[in-house]
Amino acid sequence: MKSILLTGGAGYIGSHTAKALAAAGHLPVALDNLTTGNRWAVKWGPLVEGDIADTALVRRTVEAYRIEAVIHFAARAYVGESNVVPNEYFTNNVVGSLGLFQALVDCGVRNVVFSSSCATYGHQTTPLLTEEHPQIPVNPYGDSKLFAEKALKWYEPAFGLRSVWLRYFNAAGADPGLETGECHDPETHLIPLALRASMQADAHLDVYGSDYPTPDGSCIRDYIHVMDLASAHIRALEYLLRGGPTVGLNLGTGAGSSVKDVIAMAERVTGLPVKARFRERRPGDPPSLVADASKARRVLDWQPAMSDLRTIMDTAFRWHSTRGFRSANRESRTVAA
Ligand SMILES: NC(=O)c1ccc[n+]([C@@H]2O[C@H](COP(=O)([O-])OP(=O)(O)OC[C@H]3O[C@@H](n4cnc5c(N)ncnc54)[C@H](O)[C@@H]3O)[C@@H](O)[C@H]2O)c1
């Protein structure tokens, strides 16, 4: 059994990965400041409540739990918000990450899996995005992720810290066992918003842009089931623990779904119409982002098993049917009152 530190382990992808790590016989230790994460989502190991920028806390945690590797999920991750408060994105995602990496170097931790993003590419100029596609982000969030990748590139020659940068496309779906799932406030991801606009009488889905140069005019994204992401993290850890060198890998399926495809699937799984309102395009939204995921398959011997749109939306629907769309913050306010 290895102790693995999960920064952001109380978040959406972090909690699913914690479950998969525990199933693989490891101890996931979550370090989370609970800004967007949920205390209830930490079920498979201890929660250390605090910030990645608190380097003394990181060092104490690494020593107390004899951490052998880190999966660095913690970040602010709202693309739209990053255009409004870019300073907060660079402070949290860049300055915070640099502090974390320094603490890891000081403590002798040399294996890091980093949550990067397809947002580091910017506009897609080829039919599929390979890892060699130019990285020219079109929002501060993407730039903050790219900066962390660039820093990590130099940590291997300088400090022997090897890393895998997993560039996720669009994480979606929920644990089929319904022990965890997506719970953000505000929610900005299309699939939960489409389900909510179908399941709740007073909810609508705002669709930004219907005149994109795509077959149906709406944006295309590559949705990857969160349990497939979780299994890729375990493969990436094993790769690093075997001594694999630093590498960046796309995690997607190679197949895109449009916003209108998602709406149609939401209507199929719920049996109810999605109340959609079509709006102007939003700045910073590329028309299409679809991965060439062949390198991850090759390097990690990994492939998605649950990422067809039907399975993604079925698991998300079951999760939200059980848990509703209440936010953790509202729940904890209710409890406190
Ligand atoms: N969800 C996606 O589709 C997607 C796509 C690409 C990349 N990513 C990246 O994956 C990671 C996880 O995303 P998610 O969807 O699970 O988001 P999330 O908001 O559910 O999880 C992020 C977690 O990090 C914590 N956190 C944030 N800043 C922190 C700090 N300074 N110190 C300690 N904890 C902190 C939050 O409380 C939260 O629990 C993020 O780095 C995100 O940028 C997500």
Image (spheres, rainbow, N blue to C red):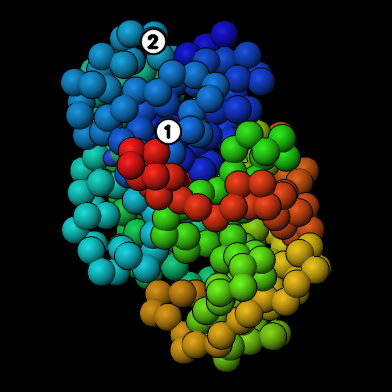
Query: In the rendered image, which residue does mark 2 sit on?
Result: 65
| Residue in the image at 25% along x and 69% along y | 84
Q: CA distance from mark 1 to mark 2?
A: 20 Å
Q: Dividing the picture into quarters, in which one does residue 283 lie? A: bottom left
Taking the image as shown, residue 1 lies to the left or right of residue 335, namely right
The type of residue carrying mark 1 is: Arg
Q: Could you say where residue 130 lies in the image, as x and y percent from the top left?
A: 59, 57
Residue type, label 2? Tyr
Q: Residue at x 18, y 21 (%)?
A: 56
Asked whether 167 or 191 is in front, the reply is 191
Q: Dot 2: within a 10 Å radius of its alpha carbon, few (fewer than 14), some, or many (20 or more) residues? A: some
Q: Residue 232, relative to residue 275: is it above or below? A: above
Find residue 7 and report its horizontal and vertical position in percent: 39, 32
Image spot of residue 58 (x, y percent):
27, 22
Q: Residue at x 56, y 85 (%)?
A: 277
Dot 1 falls on a residue whose secondary structure is: helix
Q: Secondary structure at mark 2?
A: helix
**Residue 57, placed above or below residue 7:** above
Residue 182 appears in view: yes
Q: Is mark 1 within 8 Å of ligand 1?
A: no
Q: In the image, residue 304 lies at what x, y percent?
A: 73, 44
Quarter of the N terminus within the rendering: top right
Evaluate if marks 1 and 2 touch, with contact meaning CB atoms under 8 Å apart: no
Q: Earlier in the sequence, mark 1 or mark 2?
A: 1
Which residue corresponds to the image point at 37% horizontal and 68% vertical from the top-left? 80
Q: Which residue is mark 1?
A: 39
